[in-house]
Image: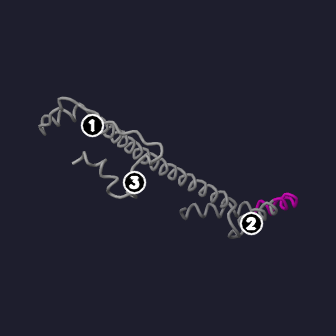
Amino acid sequence: MTVLSRRTTAQSKAQSRAQSEAAPPSRRRRHQKAMAAKRRVHAGPRRGPAPDRPLRLALWTTAVLTVGTIFGAAAFHVLLVQSQFRLDRLNHEAAEQQQRYENLRLEVARLSAPERIVAAAQERLGMVAPPDVSYLMAPAPTPGGPAVPSLAGGWSEVKPYLAARP
């Protein structure tokens, strides 16, 4: 405000005061009541919290909680995706190991086939098939004696069974 405008404001206040004093008493009382009401409203510093402070606090709290929840959800999603990648990698590794196991089982079956063993024995070791195969039959057990000879009777009882062997 400039000095000129202050004077104008001061002059206008003085004029309004002069008019209110010249006005009838009922109008003057209304004016005084209005001015008193204005003074009460603007009378001094506010005491206590501003009426909108709890609302601001609630809005800030809500905003902070919302942002925190969004960051928490994003972090959870990142952990979930990382765990899924790890699970996929482990599943892929398990499938590879299962295939390797199947291949090794096939190799064991191929190597332990009787035809392959006979061929390897003939080629590498120089073994030959016998011209004729004879089978030996075990004697039938006697009704009164033990089915299998035991060493309880001594060497003389067992020796006849072992005499044909080297």
> Of the residues shown, which amino acid type is indicated by label 1?
Ser
Query: Residue 39's mark?
Result: 2
Classify residue 91 by image quadrant.
Answer: top left
Q: Nearer the viewer, residue 75 or 82?
A: 82
Q: Which residues are magenta?
A: 18-30
Image coordinates of residue 95 in percent, x first then y, are 36, 39
Q: Residue at x 60, y 58 (%)?
A: 61
Looking at this view, is 71 or 55 the one in front?
71
In the image, what residue occupies the spot 68% across and 66% down? Answer: 49
SS type, badge 2: helix
Residue 154 on the magenta segment: no
Q: Amino acid at mark 3?
A: Ser
Q: Residue at x 13, y 40 (%)?
A: 125
Q: Is residue 121 above or below residue 86?
A: above
| Of callouts 2 and 3, the N-terminal one | 2
Label disc, if present, on residue 112 of the rendered structure:
1
